[in-house]
Amino acid sequence: MRPGVVLALVSVSALTLLGAAPGPGRDPLPAGMADTGGGSQLILAEAPDTTATDGTVSWWDLRDGQWTQAGSAPARFGSGGLVAGDTRKQGTNTTPTGLYDLPFAFGTEAAPDGTTVPYRAVKDSSWWCQDNDSASYNRWVDPLPADCRAAEAEHLVDYRTQYAHALVVGFNYDRPVRGRGAGIFLHVNGKAYTAGCVSVPADAMRRILTWADPGARPHIAIGTESGETAISRY
């Protein structure tokens, strides 16, 4: 999803959450979720509500039956806010809520030292196809296939800052539904809110990549603090 459409300033409320830990007597957020993906690592991308464009990303480890926060950072979401992933429409600049796997990482820069998740280097010939009429819809393609129009695809190398390092979010990925959306990533902040992705500062993105362990089956949960799209409902 093409990153950066509206000038973004990180909200004070998001900054106050940076590094926040559960208060006395409170269980960590993952402990209250019905489904965390079945692994022992989890990324939470949480916004105050569906109209918000700022929030927090935190990452967690399950150790001896207890979820422990490994880090957190201020986050940006789509300029259109957030929407339930199963009803999302392509081109709305909304970030899809839900629980997703993380198929692989990629970047215009080399993987940070210590990265163990599968990592693809972005080349001049690397694209993400978003053409609803293509057999490669919502797929990394290298080079661009004949049935995927360049105007309906993302030339990854054109976003050297945002895609310096990124993780693919498995939204609409296993069995893509045309028109629901393509190219949803966790990536580095640009100058603006995103067109549907989740973004974090560059240092946080590097920390997430070196933390993520494919053997721990990391997932990402995207949602809000309350309501129908609340992370706690997963």
Image (tube, grey):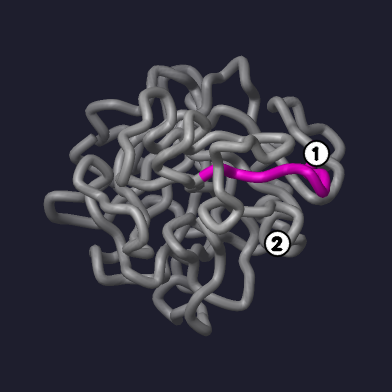
Asked if residue 129 is positioned above or below residue 102 in the image, the reply reads below
Q: Which residues are magenta?
A: 121-129
* Quadrant of the image occupied by residue 31: top left
**Residue 166 rendering spot, x and y as whole percentages:** 65, 47
Residue 124 in magenta stretch:
yes
Viewer-nearest residue: 100 or 18 = 100
Neighbor class of circle 1 (other Cα within 10 Å; few <14, some 14-19, many 20+) is: some
Residue 226 in magenta stretch:
no
**Residue 58 rendering spot, x and y as whole percentages:** 49, 49
Q: Can see residue 68?
A: no
**Residue 229 rendering spot, x and y as whole percentages:** 20, 50
Q: Can see residue 103?
A: yes
User: Which residue is depicted at the point 50% across and 75% down?
Assistant: 5
- Viewport quadrant of the C terminus: top left
Neighbor class of circle 2 (other Cα within 10 Å; few <14, some 14-19, many 20+) is: some
Viewer-nearest residue: 165 or 137 = 137
In the picture, measured across the screen, residue 161 lies left or right of residue 208, that is right
Asked if residue 231 is positioned above or below residue 203 in the image, the reply reads above
**Marks 2 and 1 close (CB-CB < 8 Å):** no
Asked if residue 131 is positioned above or below residue 189 in the image, the reply reads above
Residue on which the image places disc 2? 159
Viewer-nearest residue: 20 or 30 = 30
User: Which residue is depicted at the point 30% across and 40% down?
Assistant: 98
**Residue 91 rendering spot, x and y as whole percentages:** 36, 60
In the picture, measured across the screen, residue 207 lies left or right of residue 63, that is right
Q: Amino acid at mark 2?
A: Tyr
Residue on which the image places disc 1? 121
* Quadrant of the image occupied by residue 105: top right
User: Which residue is depicted at the point 70% across and 61% down?
Assistant: 159
Q: Amino acid at mark 1?
A: Ala
